Structures are given as structure tokens and as C-alpha cells.
Image: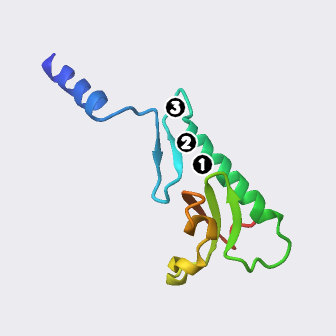
Amino acid sequence: MFLIGAWLFIRFIIGGSEDDWIKDSKGVWIKHGNPSETPDYVLEQQEAIDCALEKFNSFSGEINSQCLGSCGDYAADIVHVPRTAEDNLVENQCADYRNGIVSHFIELDKMVKL
């Protein structure tokens, strides 16, 4: 009986919920299990990603700019495939992000076009 209680304590109290939102390696919130609610910060990020993809897909022809614009508190930035050191240069980041107008950025590459 003690072992079952110890396992339940470790699993659910220390281990956390199976039904939650977690960040993947790229910083995107993903559903883990079956959470009962979607937090506002997850909805905000999902809306920003949808907005950035819409901006990206609305271009016809070649995209030459490093920055597609802002989506909420996110800047939509274009990066190379594969990502290069040039993408890390401050001068290649969106001005709204550099100037603190937005707090986050979304990186898209030219391969994303749907």
C-alpha cells in the first residue's frame, strides 16, 4: 500500500500533470495529453503564428525582406535554410523586436510557403 501511495505522490505531485501545455525545442507551445483549458499565452502564440503564416503566404514572388511585420507581441522574421550565423546578426532582426516594441519573434524560412 505504501508503494502505491509513494508512486502516486511521485507521479502526480512531483511529476506534474500529463494534461498540460509544454514548449517544444523551438519554443512553440504544444498540447501534451488532453488539457481541459487553453491558456491565453498559448492562444496568443497560436494567433501570432497563424498571422505570420498568412503574411508569408500573401506574398507573391520573391521575399527579400528580413521582416514580414508584427503579429500581436511577435515579429515575423525570415531566416535562411539551413539557419546561418547571418540570421543572428542584430541588423537582420525585425526593427520592432530590436526596438522593444514587441517581445517575441517567429522565425519562418522560405521553405514554409503553403
Image quarter of the C terminus:
bottom right
Q: Is residue 62 above or below residue 106?
A: below
Which is more toward the observer, 10 or 104?
104
Q: Position of residue 58 (x, y in %)?
A: 83, 63
Residue positioned 56% across, 69% down in the render: 98
Nearer to me, 88 or 5: 88
Q: Is residue 104 above or below residue 12?
A: below
**Label placed on residue 45:** 1
Residue type of the residue flagged with mark 3 = Asn
Provide the secondary structure element on which disc 3 rests: loop
What amino acid is at disc 1? Gln
Tell me the quarter of the picture where residue 79 sits. Answer: bottom right
Q: CA distance from mark 1 to mark 3?
A: 19 Å
Q: In the image, which is nearer the foreground, mark 1 or mark 3?
A: 1
Q: Which residue is mark 3?
A: 34
Q: Residues within 10 Å of mark 2 (few under 14, many from 20)?
A: few
Element at label 2: helix
Residue occupying the far left of the picture: 2
Q: Which residue is mark 2?
A: 41
Nearest to N terminus: mark 2 or mark 3: 3
**Residue 84, labelled with which disc?**
none
Q: Is residue 114 visible?
A: no
Compared with 78, 72 (above or below) is above
- Looking at the image, residue 21 lies above or below residue 8: below
- Type of amino acid under label 2: Tyr
Are discs 2 and 1 less than 8 Å apart at CB? yes
Question: Helix, strand or loop at disc 1?
Answer: helix
Q: Which residue: 53% across, 77% down?
A: 90
Image quadrant where residue 7 sits: top left
Q: Is residue 106 left or right of residue 59?
A: left
